Image: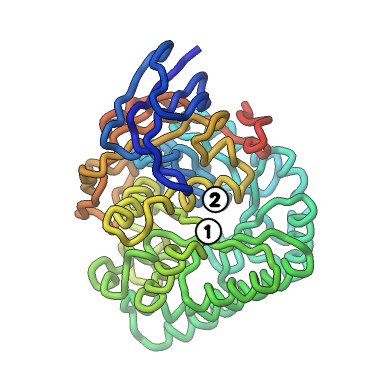
């Protein structure tokens, strides 16, 4: 029997901040409360003066394995995750081959588990040719699905309206959430060609190539079909005021539609295109201005359900090109918690929003709660100890990515991650990785306490 006691910390939960101790036995939280006895604990961590947060569940990562390891791989990506306080990742399916069958899902799970520094769950991908695989992938352990409505890495085509109806019908019947990259394919093609005809090639032109109407048009279609099927829709990387208005209208009509945004939409603005160029090209684009302001307000108000990193690494050769040729996306799993923690310590968002946005809600959306995303007895022993008086400097030496292509390099953020614990294993001690590769595949049903660890 292994046991760990974290003492004297300020435990941060959505309901408040509590001066509690946390005891973890055999990988699960066994006791939470004041002045717990250290008797029987193999190790005691003194968290005096520190915040203790649930381990982060990053619901949106593209670790690039299998098939795209030249960009990055799961070993580098999961090392980066755990160092940044992320103890569970939900890996997206646009790899080579794409995760579009039960066999491919299980094959990917076996491959990644041999390299995992964090626990992980998998999304399957759905398109016109594999809607019939929905049930098989759920049975194999998929915690949800991804549907690409617009052009993206991997060139996975969007489903037809009839396929989308079937997908959402199955989503409602089996109570499985479908995550959408919500940009209309044909509108993106149209506006991209129109922007190219302007003769300009400045990075800001990417915004004109993928305007808010492409996002809104896609969301309205998704919401309409979800309304008539009872499907469960999740709009990832929401970027605009217009998209938030479309989601609000759908919710008022009783649609189960949830929303994620990402740190780059909250932190980067129009002038950053001049500073970083194509490095900050992402899909949908960083819009800045009023959109950024409204997104921050939506996070503060609780309208946004989750914040994911949309970790999407590429090589320098793929990023440092013209805005039309550059690949979209940059790595972000390691900076997810430090960036949002800095916002909280500067008073922009409430500290108690962090466990809801970065742990509890992502786990709930994809069936991993309360095993993940919680610090209550019976939950996975995952936590992060943060020194609020310390600082995190984003440097190339601190980052664990294969290619250190981050627009945040050079920032000094409030708060320092001291320790990270994954199922009772101290994976980061005093800010340094301990080298423990103990991550496992989490199949569907993990949140209900059965089939937690699918070997």
> Residue 165 placed where, x, y %?
77, 66
> Of 38 and 316, which appears nearest the observer?
38
Instruction: Examine the rendering and report whether any part of residue 35 can be seen.
Output: yes
Examine the rendered structure and indicate whether residue 291 appears above or below residue 181.
Answer: below
Return the mark for residue 305. 1
> Of 266 and 324, which appears nearest the observer?
266
Q: Residues within 10 Å of mark 1 (few under 14, many from 20)?
A: many
Residue 4: quadrant of the picture: top left
Return the mark for residue 338. none
Task: Tell me which residue sits at (21%, 42%) in the image.
Answer: 390
> Residue 384 placed where, x, y %?
38, 37
The residue tagged with tag 2: helix, strand or loop? helix
Q: Residues within 10 Å of mark 2 (few under 14, many from 20)?
A: many
> Left or right: where does residue 48 sit relative to residue 125?
left
> Residue 149 placed where, x, y %?
61, 67
Which mark is first along the chain, 2 or 1? 1
Return the mark for residue 361. 2
The residue tagged with tag 1: helix, strand or loop? loop
> Left or right: where does residue 60 sit relative to residue 269?
right
Q: Residue furthest front?
A: 34
> Residue 29 placed where, x, y %?
51, 27
Task: Tell me which residue sits at (50%, 43%) in the image.
Answer: 89
> Left or right: where does residue 235 sit relative to residue 160?
left
């Amino acid at each position: 029997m292994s046991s760990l006691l974290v003492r004297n910390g300020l435990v941060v939960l959505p309901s408040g901040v509590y001066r509690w101790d946390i005891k973890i036995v055999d990988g699960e939280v066994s006791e939470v409360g004041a002045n717990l006895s250290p008797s029987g604990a193999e190790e005691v961590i003194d968290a005096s003066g520190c915040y203790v947060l649930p381990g982060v569940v990053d619901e949106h990562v593209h670790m690039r394995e299998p098939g795209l390891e030249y960009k990055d791989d799961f070993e580098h990506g999961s090392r980066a995750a755990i160092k940044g306080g992320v103890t569970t990742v939900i890996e997206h399916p646009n790899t080579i081959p794409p995760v579009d069958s039960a066999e491919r899902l299980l094959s990917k799970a076996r491959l990644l588990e041999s390299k995992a520094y964090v626990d992980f769950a998998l999304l399957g991908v759905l398109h016109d040719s594999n809607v019939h695989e929905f049930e098989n992938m759920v049975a194999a352990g998929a915690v949800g699905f991804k549907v690409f409505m617009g052009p993206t890495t991997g060139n996975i085509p969007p489903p037809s309206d009839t396929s989308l109806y079937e997908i959402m019908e199955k989503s409602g019947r089996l109570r499985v959430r479908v995550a959408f990259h919500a940009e209309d394919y044909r509108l993106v093609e149209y506006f991209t060609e129109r922007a190219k005809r302007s003769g300009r090639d400045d990075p800001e032109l990417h915004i004109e190539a993928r305007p808010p109407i492409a996002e809104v048009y896609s969301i309205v279609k998704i919401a309409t079909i979800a309304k008539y099927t009872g499907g469960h829709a999740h709009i990832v990387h929401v970027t605009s005021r217009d998209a938030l208005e479309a989601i609000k209208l759908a919710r008022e009509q009783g649609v189960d539609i949830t929303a994620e945004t990402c740190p780059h939409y909250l932190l980067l603005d129009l002038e950053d295109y001049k500073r970083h160029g194509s490095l900050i090209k992402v899909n949908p684009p960083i819009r800045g201005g009023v959109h950024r302001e409204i997104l921050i307000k939506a996070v503060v108000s609780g309208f946004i359900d989750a914040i994911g990193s949309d970790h999407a690494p590429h090589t320098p050769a793929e990023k440092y090109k013209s805005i039309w040729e550059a690949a979209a996306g940059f790595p972000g799993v390691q900076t997810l918690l430090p960036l949002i923690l800095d916002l909280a310590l500067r008073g922009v968002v409430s500290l108690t929003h962090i466990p809801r946005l970065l742990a509890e809600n992502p786990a709930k959306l994809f069936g991993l709660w309360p095993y993940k995303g919680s610090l209550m007895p019976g939950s996975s022993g995952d936590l992060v100890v943060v020194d609020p008086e310390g600082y995190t400097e984003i440097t190339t030496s601190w980052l664990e990515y294969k290619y250190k292509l981050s627009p945040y390099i050079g920032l000094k953020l409030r708060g320092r991650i001291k320790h990270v614990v994954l199922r009772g294993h101290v994976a980061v001690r005093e800010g340094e990785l301990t080298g423990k590769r103990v991550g496992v595949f989490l199949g569907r049903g993990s949140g209900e306490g059965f089939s937690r660890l699918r070997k």
